[in-house]
């Protein structure tokens, strides 16, 4: 067992180390340049053709299983989660305020990455004989790169199916159980049983039920959390310029030790900022393409939803968490993770502040599990066929209970490693298919549709 732990620790250091971080950021930067900085120069257009269409009640296209809004809500159910609270707090605790700057960098180039994943997910999806939509990284590897690359698609699908049981399941269930026990005294056993029921009722109904649930819960939970953070920030608005000053200064200068904070080198700021940014918005992992492929939409327009998915997750929600920690001067306490975020909210908003964090952790964990169950089952369905769907859902529920009542730390660590490894096949596909994305983007920009108001 010790040998397994040691090997995984070594491999994890490579997977989430500087070379792999460079590959992840480099892919996003490459796509940004190839696409003509599309996510920046056409940000307004992407809003009008994504959330803007939702507000105008524009008729959806055909070809998918769920609406575009349900698809992005399901994707954001996976991205807006523990990473937005505990992940941000951990990045600051280990890398200092400068980590937030590098988190932003990962998101700005990650917007192009997620655009590519969503667009390719729709372009290369298939409709089976029963009318079910099949799509995601596996399909754009096999169909976009050619059948000779199917082995790489299988590797991705296998890793994604296992990672879903860890990062998308056990870690989330354990976080939910810890939050409910800390805030409301609910025993982990009760949380485990309750989570099986609540998650099971949704995932056993398939993607349409997951999409409908996510479309209701994701906007609600994000708004409640953002409002709580804004209240804290506005009551200490005089400290906001200083908070931004810390972020920009310490992105390029070491952070000195203060109180319980041990200080951080610039290398730590870069490493933890990028790693936690990717953990939060998942740009590069490719899993979101599985649910984006389900949307009733065209490739480029669905890609625009992907741009805003990353923007809201990291530039908005993660920044809110970071600012609350910095304006309340909670960093010197020495706390990390969810405890640091909870301390900061409690300081800025005594009483309800801590409840907002605990409520957010519980609800964010719940919605993350819903979408990751779909990612996992679709990944393994690609390898083993439809017969694996129901067994996988039942296995997913069983792992959820194990995670809630204690779980196995080794499985979490291994799943974290697999979560990083699954990015490699996706990044290869994105780099090779960059030309396809450029053609799709150019065709869309030359169409009358791009001129819609």
Image: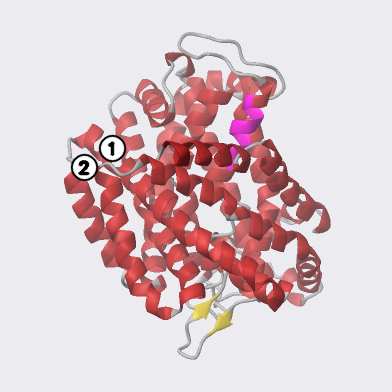
- Counting from the top left corner in percent of width and height, residue 77 is at 44, 55
Residue 24 point in image, percent of width and height = 68, 47
Badge 2 is on which residue? Answer: 188
Tag 1: Cα neighbours inside 10 Å, few (<14), some, or many (≥20)? many
Magenta-highlighted residues: 268-277
Task: Please report the residue visible at 27 percent of the width from the left and 46 percent of the height from the top.
Answer: 404
Work out whether residue 339 can be spotted: yes
Q: Is residue 48 visible?
A: no
Residue 185 in which image quadrant: top left
Q: Residue 341 appears in which quarter of the rendering? A: top left
Position in image of residue 238 (x %, y %): 54, 18
Q: Which mark is residue 22?
A: none
Disc 1: which residue: 178
Gap between marks 2 and 1, in whole Å? 7 Å
> Between 383 and 249, which is closer to the camera in this rendering?
383
Residue 195 versus residue 13 in the image, above or below:
below
Quadrant location of the C terminus?
Answer: bottom right
The residue positioned 54% from the left and 44% from the top of the image is 279
Is residue 262 covered in magenta?
A: no
Residue 276 painted magenta: yes
How far across and how far down the image is residue 248, in percent? 68, 24
Q: Are marks 2 and 1 in contact (CB under 8 Å)?
A: yes
Q: Main secondary structure of the magenta part?
A: helix
What SS does tag 1 mark? helix
């Amino acid at each position: 067992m010790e040998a397994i732990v040691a090997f995984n620790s070594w491999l994890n250091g490579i997977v989430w180390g500087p070379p792999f971080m460079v590959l992840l950021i480099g892919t996003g930067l490459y796509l940004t340049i190839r696409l003509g900085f599309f996510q920046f120069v056409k940000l307004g257009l992407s809003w009008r053709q994504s959330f803007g269409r939702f507000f105008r009640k524009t008729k959806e296209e055909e070809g998918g299983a769920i609406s575009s809004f349900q698809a992005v809500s399901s994707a954001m159910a996976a991205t807006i989660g523990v990473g937005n609270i505990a992940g941000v707090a951990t990045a600051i605790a280990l890398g200092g305020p400068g980590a937030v700057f590098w988190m932003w960098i990962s998101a700005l180039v990650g917007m192009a990455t997620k655009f590519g994943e969503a667009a390719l997910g729709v372009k290369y999806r298939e409709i089976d004989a029963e009318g079910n939509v099949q799509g995601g990284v596996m399909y754009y590897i096999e169909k976009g790169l050619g059948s000779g690359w199917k082995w790489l698609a299988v590797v991705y699908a296998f890793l994604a199916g296992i990672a879903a049981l860890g990062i998308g399941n056990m870690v989330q269930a354990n976080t939910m159980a810890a939050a409910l026990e800390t805030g409301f005294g609910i025993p982990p056993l009760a949380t485990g049983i309750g989570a099986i029921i609540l998650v099971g009722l949704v995932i056993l109904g398939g993607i349409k039920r997951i999409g409908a649930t996510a479309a209701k819960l994701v906007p609600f939970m994000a708004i409640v959390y953002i409002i709580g953070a804004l209240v804290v920030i506005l009551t200490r608005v005089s400290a906001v310029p200083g908070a931004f000053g810390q972020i920009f200064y310490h992105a390029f200068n070491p952070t000195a030790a203060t109180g319980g904070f041990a200080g951080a080198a610039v290398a730590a700021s870069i490493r933890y900022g990028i790693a936690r940014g990717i953990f939060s918005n998942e740009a590069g992992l490719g899993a979101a393409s599985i649910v984006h492929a389900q949307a009733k939409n065209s490739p480029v327009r669905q890609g625009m939803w992907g741009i805003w998915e990353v923007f809201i997750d990291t530039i908005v929600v993660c920044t809110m968490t970071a600012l609350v920690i910095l304006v309340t001067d909670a960093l010197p306490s020495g706390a990390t993770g969810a405890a640091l975020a909870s301390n900061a909210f409690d300081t800025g908003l005594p009483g309800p502040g801590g409840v907002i964090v605990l409520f957010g952790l519980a609800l964010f964990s719940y919605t993350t599990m819903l979408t990751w169950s779909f990612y996992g089952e679709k990944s393994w369905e690609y390898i083993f066929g439809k017969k694996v769907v129901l067994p996988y859902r039942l296995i997913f529920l069983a792992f959820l209970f194990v995670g809630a009542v204690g779980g196995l730390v080794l499985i979490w660590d291994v799943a974290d490693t697999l979560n990083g490894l699954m990015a490699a096949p996706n990044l290869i596909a994105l780099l090779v298919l960059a030309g396809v994305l450029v053609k799709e983007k150019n065709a869309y920009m030359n169409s009358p549709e791009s001129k819609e108001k």
